[in-house]
Image: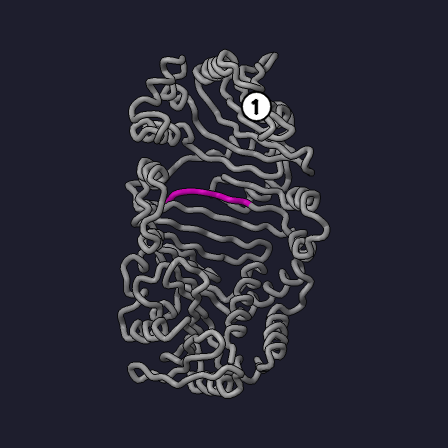
C-alpha cells in the first residue's frame, strides 16, 4: 500500500485552495497540534473542507486562475487517477469522504522537510480504520501489525512508514518512532501544551485558512547552531536573538486576492519600526519590482561597528577598519549617519535592458563628498575600469569582464545616493527620486497594491504582467514547466509586501492580487 498519494492529494488541495484564496477558515482552532510531539520545530495546519460562500468563492477564483469550474472535483479526480496509475485504486466518495474531517496537519520533527508526518482529522474513526485495513490488504508491499500503548497500527510498504488511527485522527508517520511519539503526544505532552507554541500561534490571523509555525531557535539548535557569526552579530545588533525567535505565517483568503500574514517574535527588545513607502513610491515608473527598508543608515552603522570590532580575517585587524579608511579621507561613521531609508528597484523587459539600482535617501553633503573621495582614491591607485561621472552628479563607474556589458555605477546628488547596474538605471533612480519623470506611484497596479494593504505601509511591490514579460523573454520556450505555469501566472496583477509592528511582534503581509 502507498497511502502517500492520499496525503499528497490532500496537501495539493491545501495548496490549490491557498492559491484560489478561499476556504473554511480557522485552522488554528482545532486540536491537530495536540498530536504533534513536543519540541516540533515546524508545524502546519489547514482547513480542507470549504463550505457555503467560501466554497463558491474558491470555485470562482479557481475558474479565473486555472479555468476550473469545481476545484474540489478536480482534486478528487487527480487523486483517483493517481491511485489507479499505482495499481491501488481509491474511490474518494465512498472510501475517504465519509470520514474526512475539517482539518489536516503536517509536522516536521527536524529541518529536513523530506521527513513529513501527517495528521488528518476524522469524523468517523471506525470508518477510517476500515479504510486503512482495506488499503493494507490491497498493498503490493507488505505491512506488519504493531501495537503501542493500546493503539494498533501498521508498518511497512515501500517506504516503511507507520499508519494508524490515534483517537479521532488518521496518522501517517515516517517510521515507528515518529508514530509512537504522536501516540505519546495524544496522552497530554504535546506541542499544543508548550508556551512557545501557544504564544506564537495566538498571533495567527483570525479566519486563516492555513497556519504554519516555525521555531527558528530550535531549528538552529538542531543544525548545530550553524549560523555565520557575523550574521548572528548583526542580528543581535538589531535587537534580534535568533536562538529564541519564532514565526507564524497565516493564509487569509479573499475574493480577489490571497494574503499571507507573517507574525514573528524576534526575541529582541523591540521590533523594527519605520515607513519607507514614500521612497519606494518614488522609484522609476518603468520598474517592475521594488523593495524598501526604513532606517538603513542605522542598520549600516551597527554593521560597520560590529565589523570594525571583529575585524576581517586575514585582511583587517580588529579596530582598524574605520581608522584605516579615516586616514584615506573616508569617514564611515559620518557616512552611515547621513543615510536614511533605502530602496531597490529592477527594470527591463529582456536581458539587454535589464538593470536596477539601490537608492538611499541622505541628509547633508557628507555622502556626496565621500563618493567623490572614493572615486578619486580608486583612480589614484590605478584601479582598472574606473571612470569619473561627468555633469551634475558626483560619482564614478567601474567596468570589468566580471560585470558583463554594463558598468557598476555609484552616483550621488543632494539627498540621494544611487548604486546600480548600468548608467541609465542608476541615474533614473536619482531622477525619479527627485520627482523628475513618472514613478512607481503613477503605476495603477502599484496603486492597487497600496490599497490592498490598507493601513499597512507598503515595502515591496512587483508588477505581475511586467515580471511575466521579462521571464518569458529570459526563459527558453523549451522549458515545458514554465510554459505550463504561464497560464496561471497570467492571472496575477501584482504582488504587494507590507511591514509593520504590533507590540513586540514584527508583522509582514504578502498579497497576491488577481486580475
- How many numbered discs, if any? 1
The segment highlighted magenta reads: 496-502
Q: Position of residue 383 (x, y in %)?
A: 52, 18
| SS class, disc 1 | strand
Q: Where is residue 367 in the image (x, y as percent from the top left)?
A: 45, 18
Identify the residue shown where x is 37% and y is 26%.
315
511 left or right, relative to 172? right
300 left or right, relative to 475? left
| Residue 500 within the segment the image draws in magenta | yes
Identify the residue shown where x is 32% and y is 22%.
320
Which residue matches tag 1? 409
Is residue 203 shown above or below 50?
A: above
Q: Nearer the viewer, residue 360 or 115?
A: 115
Q: Position of residue 282 (x, y in %)?
A: 56, 30
Is residue 338 shown above or below 95?
A: above
Q: Which of 288 and 426 is in front in this view?
A: 426
371 left or right, relative to 475? left
Magenta segment's dominant SS is: strand
Q: Where is residue 3 in the image (x, y as percent from the top left)?
A: 50, 77
Amino acid at each position: 500500500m502507498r497511502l502517500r498519494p492520499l496525503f499528497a492529494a490532500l496537501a495539493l488541495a491545501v495548496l490549490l485552495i491557498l492559491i484560489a484564496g478561499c476556504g473554511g477558515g480557522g485552522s488554528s482552532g482545532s486540536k491537530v497540534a495536540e498530536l504533534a510531539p513536543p519540541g516540533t520545530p515546524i508545524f502546519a495546519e489547514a482547513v480542507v473542507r470549504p463550505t457555503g460562500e467560501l466554497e463558491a468563492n474558491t470555485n470562482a477564483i479557481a475558474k479565473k486562475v486555472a479555468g476550473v469550474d469545481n476545484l474540489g472535483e478536480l482534486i478528487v479526480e487527480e487523486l483517483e487517477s493517481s491511485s489507479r496509475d499505482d495499481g491501488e485504486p481509491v474511490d474518494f466518495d465512498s472510501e475517504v469522504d465519509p470520514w474526512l474531517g475539517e482539518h489536516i496537519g503536517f509536522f516536521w520533527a527536524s529541518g529536513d522537510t523530506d521527513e513529513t508526518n501527517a495528521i488528518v482529522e476524522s469524523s468517523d474513526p471506525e470508518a477510517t480504520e476500515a479504510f486503512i485495513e482495506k488499503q493494507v490488504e490491497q498493498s503490493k508491499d507488505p505491512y506488519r501489525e504493531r501495537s503501542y500503548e493500546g493503539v494498533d497500527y501498521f508498518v511497512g510498504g515501500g517506504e516503511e512508514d507507520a499508519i494508524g488511527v490515534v483517537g479521532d485522527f488518521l496518522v501517517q508517520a515516517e517510521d515507528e518512532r515518529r508514530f509512537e511519539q504522536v501516540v505519546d503526544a495524544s496522552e497530554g505532552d504535546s506541542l499544543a501544551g508548550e508556551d512557545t507554541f501557544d504564544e506564537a500561534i495566538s498571533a495567527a490571523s483570525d479566519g486563516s485558512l492555513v497556519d504554519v509555525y516555525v521555531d527558528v531557535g530550535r531549528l538552529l539548535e538542531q543544525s548545530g547552531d550553524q549560523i555565520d557569526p557575523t550574521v548572528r552579530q548583526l542580528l543581535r545588533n538589531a535587537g534580534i536573538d535568533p536562538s529564541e525567535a519564532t514565526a507564524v505565517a497565516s493564509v487569509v483568503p479573499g475574493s480577489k486576492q490571497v494574503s499571507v500574514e507573517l507574525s514573528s517574535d524576534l526575541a529582541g527588545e523591540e521590533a523594527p519600526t519605520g515607513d519607507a513607502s514614500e521612497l519606494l513610491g518614488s522609484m522609476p515608473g518603468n520598474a517592475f519590482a521594488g523593495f524598501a527598508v526604513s532606517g538603513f543608515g542605522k542598520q549600516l552603522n551597527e554593521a560597520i561597528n560590529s565589523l570594525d570590532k571583529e575585524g576581517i580575517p586575514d585582511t583587517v585587524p580588529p579596530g582598524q577598519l574605520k581608522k584605516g579608511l579615516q586616514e584615506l579621507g573616508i569617514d564611515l561613521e559620518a557616512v552611515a549617519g547621513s543615510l536614511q531609508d533605502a530602496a531597490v528597484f529592477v527594470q527591463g523587459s529582456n536581458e539587454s535592458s535589464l538593470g536596477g539600482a539601490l537608492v538611499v535617501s541622505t541628509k547633508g553633503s557628507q555622502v556626496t563628498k565621500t563618493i567623490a573621495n572614493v572615486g578619486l582614491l580608486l583612480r589614484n591607485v590605478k584601479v582598472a575600469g574606473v571612470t569619473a561621472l561627468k555633469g551634475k552628479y558626483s560619482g564614478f563607474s567601474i567596468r570589468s569582464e566580471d560585470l558583463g556589458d554594463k558598468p557598476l555605477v555609484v552616483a550621488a546628488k543632494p539627498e540621494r545616493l544611487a548604486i546600480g547596474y548600468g548608467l541609465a538605471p542608476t541615474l533614473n533612480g536619482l531622477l525619479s527620486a527627485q520627482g523628475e519623470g513618472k514613478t512607481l506611484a503613477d503605476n495603477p497596479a502599484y496603486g492597487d497594491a497600496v490599497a490592498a494593504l490598507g493601513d499597512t505601509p507598503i515595502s515591496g511591490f512587483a508588477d505581475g504582467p511586467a515580471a511575466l514579460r521579462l521571464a518569458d523573454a529570459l526563459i527558453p520556450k523549451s522549458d515545458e514547466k514554465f510554459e505550463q505555469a504561464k497560464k496561471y501566472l497570467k492571472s496575477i496583477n501584482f504582488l504587494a509586501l507590507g511591514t509593520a509592528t504590533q507590540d513586540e511582534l514584527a508583522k509582514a503581509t504578502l498579497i497576491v492580487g488577481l486580475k
